[in-house]
Image (cartoon, rainbow, N blue to C red):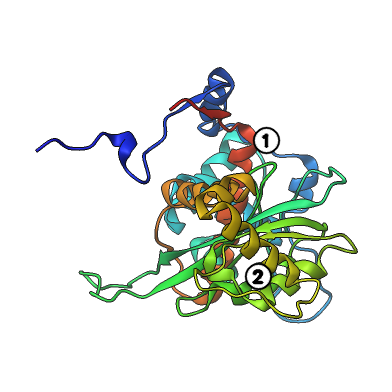
Amino acid sequence: MKYPKRSQYKHAKSRYRVRNWSEYEAGLQRRGDVTVWLSDAALDAWRAPASGKPGGQRTYADIAIEAALTIRMVFHLPLRQTEGFLRCLADLFEVDLPIPDHTTLSRRLKTLRVTGFRRLATGRPIHLLIDSTGLRIHVGHMQKPPRNRAWRKLHLAVDAASGEIVASDLTARRTHDCTQVPALLEQIPDPIASLSADGAYDTRAVYEAAHERGEGRAVRVLIPPGRDAQLSPQPSAALEERNRNIRSIRELGRREWHTSSGYSQRSMAENTVFRYKTIIGRSMRSRTFDGQRVEVQLASKVLNTMTRLGMPDSYRVA
């Protein structure tokens, strides 16, 4: 029997080459750089200011806890090893800096307020890509994970221009993807030019939430409707985008619409999910839901830092 060629399959795997290989390789090397720079402002803000109230006072500010937990996230260290790593850094720099112990890090993780994602000011609206994935949770002292292991659902919003994560959230596994779009958009202060997501987000609430964030501009919403989707007879301004997608798919076909409309760019969000699971990991270490949400926010900031160091500029060759 003669097997078909790979190019004859419906979804043939494409080949890509990287244009900026030297810059990308240098960025990969910088990701392993362990140079630590402590500014005077960071040292002054390390200790929490006195509140003036009687009773126990906080010794460490949020910036100290966030720095320690970020180092833990980058080097995949347990809390006790993180404490030892920070004490070693303080000795090497010869600075009189109090180091939070592992119990303090574990306790403050649940209530830490992580600073928001920083995006370079461009003055242009954002082209947003949204996707979600599952993350395993800690199983405690069980020697063997249960067969139906519990997991959380991670929601990410990615800037199509820079590839950086601009919003993230963590929910229970049974939460529908479409219900988290308004919460993700609230984390983004800039107006939105377009929003791309998969078919799980094809609901009225998503179209309306995107339309409200246009700030007077038309927002292009690229969500593939179901195969039996029907046109809305009296669509609102938000649902007119859905009718537009249905007409285009009927005229061009679904695969051609993916390319001509720009929906294929949503693969960048899937690539971000892959990078998250490859670099950070497929499971979370925190055992409480509040700690897990903070852990996800810190991991997203770590990925953004690595993205700024350099990303490949690839092009398709076959």
In three-dimensional space, the C-alpha distance between marks 2 and 1, rounded to whole angstroms, equals 37 Å
Q: Is residue 34 left or right of residue 116?
A: left
Question: Quadrant of the rendered structure where residue 60 is?
Answer: bottom right
Secondary structure beneath dot 2 equals helix
Of mark 2 and mark 1, the one earlier in the sequence is 1
Q: Return the x and y of residue 228 as percentages of the image width and height.
A: 51, 73
Secondary structure beneath dot 1 equals loop
Residue located farthest toward the right when viewing the structure as drawn: 216
Instruction: Name the quadrant of the N terminus.
Output: top left
What amino acid is at disc 1? Trp
Residue depicted at x 66% and y 46%: 160
Q: Return the x and y of residue 18 as percentages of the image width and height.
A: 52, 24
Q: Is residue 196 visible?
A: yes
Q: Which residue is mark 1?
A: 37
Q: Which residue is mark 2?
A: 181
What amino acid is at disc 2? Val
Q: Is residue 130 visible?
A: no
**Of 63 and 13, which appears nearest the observer?**
13
Question: Quadrant of the rendered structure where residue 122 is?
Answer: top right
**Of 216 and 312, which appears nearest the observer?**
216
Residue located farthest toward the top when viewing the structure as drawn: 22
> How dense is the environment of label 1, judged by Cα within 10 Å: few (below 14), some, or many (20 and up)?
few
Instruction: Name the quadrant of the C terminus.
Output: top left
**Of 38 and 173, which appears nearest the observer?**
173
